[in-house]
Amino acid sequence: MTGTQISYYFHCKRHLWLFSHSINMEHNSDTVALGKHISDTTYTRIQHEIHIPSEDGDIVIDFYDAKSKIIHEVKKSDKMEETHIWQVKHYINQLEKKGIIGVTGEIDYPKLKQKIQVELTDYDREELAQIKNEISTIIESEILPEVINKPFCKNCSYYDLCYV
Ligand code: SF4
């Protein structure tokens, strides 16, 4: 389970299914980054990102400040979205599973000149487990979810596959 899959779960279930079945139409896809082999079991700084091996799949964090225990995520988007928050909650949860307690997150939106603070509550932990179960169900299904006919489909890399 990766932050990217959580993002696609909120974005479009069909996109999640296609991506998770390695049907990739993006040359610059996160698949490339996520597919890098990470043999080290400790944190590895690769350029500006940090790759953390995890039992649920390696996670890629923009930056982790170990001193203040804050995960920093930078979003180029000009819109704040719920999915960004759940991605960071997922990262906090993964660090917890590694015994790193008391971590919080901060999402930076340079275009909006705004920041969001993210915490993981007990309620979130349950919600996250539910989300992950639903993601597993979607991925394991042999049935491709229906197209969603949203305006943003036109900008999706799977547009041709879905509509043409
Ligand atoms: S084109 Fe639309 S329906 Fe198809 S995967 Fe992308 S977002 Fe989903």
Image (cartoon, grey):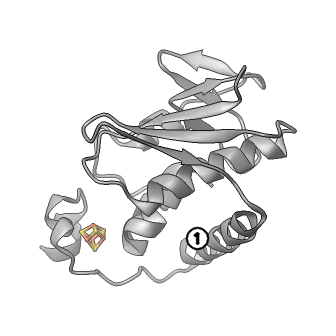
Vertical position of residue 51 compared to residue 54: above or below? above
Q: Decide which of 75, 43 is in the foreground and name it.
A: 75
Residue sitting nearer the eye, 142 or 137? 137
- Queried on whether the Cβ of the residue with tag 1 lies below 8 angstroms from ligand 1, the answer reads no
Q: From the image, which quarter does the N terminus lie in?
A: bottom right
Answer whether residue 114 is visible to the viewer in this image: yes
Q: Is residue 42 above or below residue 159?
A: above
Q: In the orientation shown, which residue stands out farthest toward the right?
A: 99
Task: Give residue 101's position: percent from left, percent from top.
Answer: 83, 40
Quadrant in the rendering for residue 96: top right
28 versus 18 height, above or below = above
Q: Which residue is mark 1?
A: 135
Q: Position of residue 77 (x, y in %)?
A: 28, 46
Q: Residue at x 25, y 62 (%)?
A: 158
Q: Quadrant of the C terminus?
A: bottom left
Q: Is residue 19 left or right of residue 135?
A: left
Image coordinates of residue 143 in percent, x first then y, are 47, 83
Q: Residue at x 28, y 81 (%)?
A: 148
Q: What's the residue type where badge 1 is placed?
A: Ile
Q: Position of residue 55 (x, y in %)?
A: 77, 46
Tell me if I can see residue 17 in this picture: no
Element on which disc 1 rests: helix
* 39 sits left or right of 62 in the view: right
Task: Name the quarter showing ligand 1.
Answer: bottom left
Residue name at image x 82 percent, y 36 percent = 100
Circle 1 crowding by C-alpha within 10 Å: few under 14, some 14–19, many from 20: many
